[in-house]
């Protein structure tokens, strides 16, 4: 079985937390529309001015999803 990859979108500024929460909603909609597994998304406030939204995908699916959704970065997912 392959690795899972956490695709990450960074948001900065005074509205970063609100934007990351909203972006996560769109990620959930995309997962439901495309029936992707695993169904893992989230958002996290790193500082007052920097928040992220993320989704976890299987490594084999990462290239297509990356090219479609254009995350800012990614990392190996370790739950």
Image (tube, rainbow, N blue to C red):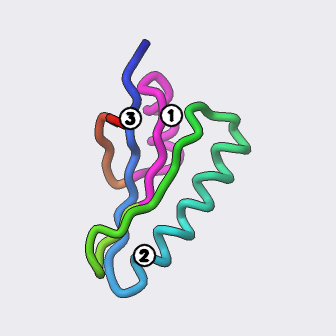
Q: 10 or 45: nearer the eye?
A: 45
Relative to 15, is 44 above or below? Answer: above
Mark 1: secondary structure: helix
Picture residue at 52% right of the left edge, 69% below the top = 21
Picture residue at 40% right of the left edge, 29% below the top = 4
**Marks 2/3: CA–CA distance:** 22 Å
Q: Earlier in the sequence, mark 3 or mark 1?
A: 3
Mark 1, Cα crowd under 10 Å, few <14 / some 14-19 / many 20+, is: few
Q: Which residues are magenta?
A: 53-71
Indicate the quadrant containing the C terminus: top left, top right, bottom left or bottom right.
Answer: top left
Question: Residue 6 occupies which quadrant of the picture?
Answer: top left
Reading the image, the residue beneath label 3 is: 5
Q: Position of residue 1 (x, y in %)?
A: 43, 12
Residue furthest front as drawn: 79
Residue 39: which numbered mark, if any?
none
Q: Earlier in the sequence, mark 2 or mark 1?
A: 2
Residue furthest right as drawn: 33
**Marks 2/1: CA–CA distance:** 27 Å
Mark 2: secondary structure: helix
Left or right of 36 on screen, residue 20 = left
Reading the image, the residue beneath label 1 is: 64
Reading the image, the residue beneath label 2 is: 17
């Amino acid at each position: 079985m392959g690795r899972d990859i956490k695709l990450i979108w960074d948001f900065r500024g005074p509205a970063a937390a609100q934007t990351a929460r909203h972006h996560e909603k769109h990620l959930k909609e995309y997962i439901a529309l495309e029936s992707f597994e695993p169904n893992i998304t989230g958002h996290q406030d790193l500082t007052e001015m920097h928040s992220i939204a993320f989704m976890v995908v299987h490594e084999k699916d990462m290239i297509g999803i990356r090219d479609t959704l254009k995350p800012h970065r990614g990392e190996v997912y370790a739950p």
